[in-house]
Amino acid sequence: MTTEVNEAQAFTGWSYEHTPEEAVREALDMARRRALIAGFASDECVLLFVNATRLGPGCYAGDAGLRCAR
């Protein structure tokens, strides 16, 4: 069985927060919001990556990526 994909897009998000968990959560939320605005349902998206990087004491950068297809 072959599934035809009519449209596919990637969405990214980023954040700077006080903990790595917050940074990742906010980055993923941003990517999900961007996908939603583009008209993709959450079940049409898969997680590509999620990262947290320590920038200094109490400062973390988070980034996340989604790939959505329909």
Image (cartoon, rainbow, N blue to C red):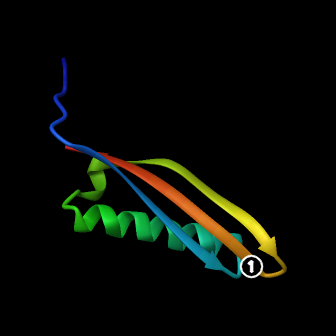
23 and 55: which one is in front?
55
Residue drawn at (82%, 76%) of the image? 56
Q: Is residue 45 above or below residue 4?
A: below
Residue drawn at (23%, 57%) of the image? 40
Q: Is residue 34 left or right of residue 53?
A: left
| The N terminus - image quarter | top left
Q: Is residue 19 above or below residue 68?
A: below
| Image spot of residue 10 (x, y percent) | 36, 50
| The C terminus - image quarter | top left
Q: Is residue 22 above or below residue 53?
A: below
Q: Secondary structure at mark 1?
A: strand
Q: Is residue 53 above or below residue 65?
A: below
Q: What amino acid type should be assigned to the residue bearing mark 1?
A: Cys
In the rendered image, the residue lying farthest to the right is: 57
Tell me the quarter of the picture where residue 59 sits: bottom right
Tell me the quarter of the picture where residue 52 sits: bottom right
Q: Quick one: label 1, few (<14), some, or many (20+) residues within 10 Å?
A: some
Q: Is residue 20 left or right of residue 57?
A: left
18 and 16: which one is in front?
16
| Image spot of residue 3 (x, y percent) | 19, 27
Residue drawn at (15%, 37%) of the image? 6
Residue drawn at (24%, 68%) of the image? 37
| Image spot of residue 50 (x, y percent) | 57, 55
Q: Is residue 16 left or right of residue 46?
A: right
Tell me the quarter of the picture where residue 12 sits: bottom left
Q: What is the total number of numbered labels drawn onto the structure image?
A: 1
Residue pointed to by mark 1: 59
| Image spot of residue 25 (x, y percent) | 54, 70
Q: Is residue 22 left or right of residue 45?
A: right
